[in-house]
Image (cartoon, rainbow, N blue to C red):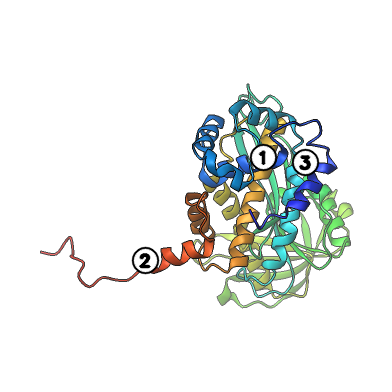
């Protein structure tokens, strides 16, 4: 918790007057309890209450001043503005991004590269009618813009399941010189032209119905999987007006699967193979969504209202970024998964985190034992 700037947290609380008229169990208490649930994988509000009360002698040292009860925590999640924790997550993101500014992501490129995508999280439609998805299913959709250096989310929006992914493009303030990698779900030429006019670059896949005319072809090395590199103009009835500028079309065939891909970009300077590699790096955001679903408590919720679900999701994001900050600042050479597991298991220990990892790595070294018997040896 020392890596979380408490004064910035209080500024977020004061911005929305979230602690106004509260006699006990402040927003700080709520955040600590919900962060404890994320780090230790608690299943329910009662689970949180029982575990924290079992550690009652250590709660004051942690910073929890109010009495922890299931009903109080439920009321806090239902009634306190979720934007407090959204603002806190953005504060932590601003701290984390410079720490990971020089992390490699698989493509030798000095510019900033973002991946844009969305994932759905199922909810009960009868309990959360504000989050429709299909006829008999409810879902919450998390839209994320991921900085591929360090896999730090820079933009997150939480909507109901039927919200169109394209709406997110209207909310983004594009960074000049940066690359935005996205799949075909974001192929909207009017919005992409606005992105291009801001000085940013995009890499996406062409739809089968995309109509264009070739203007110029550049030579490619077929041994790398490239099939063509062309300058094109859109000739569709609508697209030729919504995107009046030239585009670059790169065709690539994956040697392992034999699948063919057609990429569209507004960048004409990078090598064609780099364009294909940039789109391949988009997989990092899929890994990010899979990671947080597996290792954070966002698959099941402690409340059903919009405010409660958004509160839990934003606290989960802030815990993820906080763990990334602590791992990078302490320079612990382990995966984020291992770091999260060890911290969650020793959450109430007063030993320094570095000492915990030193003991774990020195006591159980990973070596090949020559005395190990072969189970299948005759």
Q: Residues within 10 Å of mark 2 (few under 14, many from 20)?
A: few
Residue 40: image location, x then y, percent: 51, 45
Mark 1 or 3, nearer chain start? 1
Which quadrant would residue 217 be assigned to in this image? bottom right
Question: Is 202 situated above or below 312?
Answer: below
Mark 3 or 2, nearer chain start? 3
Residue lying at 83% horizontally and 42% vertically, measured from the top left: 14
Residue lying at 54% horizontally and 67% vertically, measured from the top left: 332
3D distance between C-alphas at marks 3 and 2: 44 Å
3D distance between C-alphas at marks 1 and 2: 36 Å
Residue lying at 62% horizontally and 52% vertically, measured from the top left: 320
In-front residue for pair 283/354: 354
Residue 142: image location, x then y, percent: 68, 43
Per the image, the residue denoted by label 3 is 83
Per the image, the residue denoted by label 2 is 363
Per the image, the residue denoted by label 1 is 29
Q: Which quadrant of the rendered structure holds the C terminus?
A: bottom left
């Amino acid at each position: 918790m020392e890596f979380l700037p408490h004064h910035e947290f209080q500024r977020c609380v004061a911005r929305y007057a979230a602690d106004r008229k509260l006699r006990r169990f402040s927003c700080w208490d709520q955040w600590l309890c919900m962060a404890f649930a994320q780090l230790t994988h608690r299943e329910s509000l009662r689970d949180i209450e029982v575990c924290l009360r079992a550690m009652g002698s250590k709660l004051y040292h942690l910073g929890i001043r109010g009495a922890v009860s299931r009903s109080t925590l439920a009321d806090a999640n239902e009634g306190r503005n979720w934007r407090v924790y959204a603002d806190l997550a953005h504060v932590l993101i601003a701290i984390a991004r410079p720490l990971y500014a020089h992390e490699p992501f698989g493509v030798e490129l000095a510019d900033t590269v973002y991946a844009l995508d969305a994932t759905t999280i199922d909810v009960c439609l009868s309990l959360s009618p504000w989050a429709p998805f299909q006829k008999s299913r409810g879902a919450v959709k998390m839209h994320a813009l991921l900085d591929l250096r360090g896999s730090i989310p820079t933009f997150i929006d939480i909507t109901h399941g039927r919200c169109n992914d394209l709406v997110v493009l209207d909310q983004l303030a594009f960074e000049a010189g940066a690359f935005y990698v996205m799949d075909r779900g974001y192929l909207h030429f009017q919005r992409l032209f606005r992105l291009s006019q801001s000085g940013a670059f995009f890499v996406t896949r062409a739809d089968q119905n995309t109509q264009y005319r070739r203007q110029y072809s550049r030579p490619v090395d077929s041994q790398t999987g490239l099939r063509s590199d062309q300058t094109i103009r859109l000739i569709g009835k609508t697209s030729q007006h919504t995107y009046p500028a030239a585009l670059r079309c790169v065709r690539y065939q994956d040697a392992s699967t034999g699948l063919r891909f057609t990429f569209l970009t507004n960048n004409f300077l990078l090598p064609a193979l780099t364009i294909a590699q940039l789109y391949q790096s988009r997989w990092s955001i899929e890994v990010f969504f899979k990671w947080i679903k597996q290792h954070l408590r966002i698959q099941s919720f402690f409340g059903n209202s919009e405010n409660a679900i958004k509160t839990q999701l934003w606290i989960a994001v802030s815990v993820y970024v906080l763990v990334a900050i602590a791992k990078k600042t302490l320079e612990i050479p382990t995966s984020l998964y291992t770091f999260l597991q060890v911290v969650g298991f020793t959450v109430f220990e007063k030993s320094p985190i570095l000492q915990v990892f030193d003991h774990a790595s020195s006591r159980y070294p990973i070596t090949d034992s020559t005395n190990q018997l072969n189970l299948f040896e005759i």
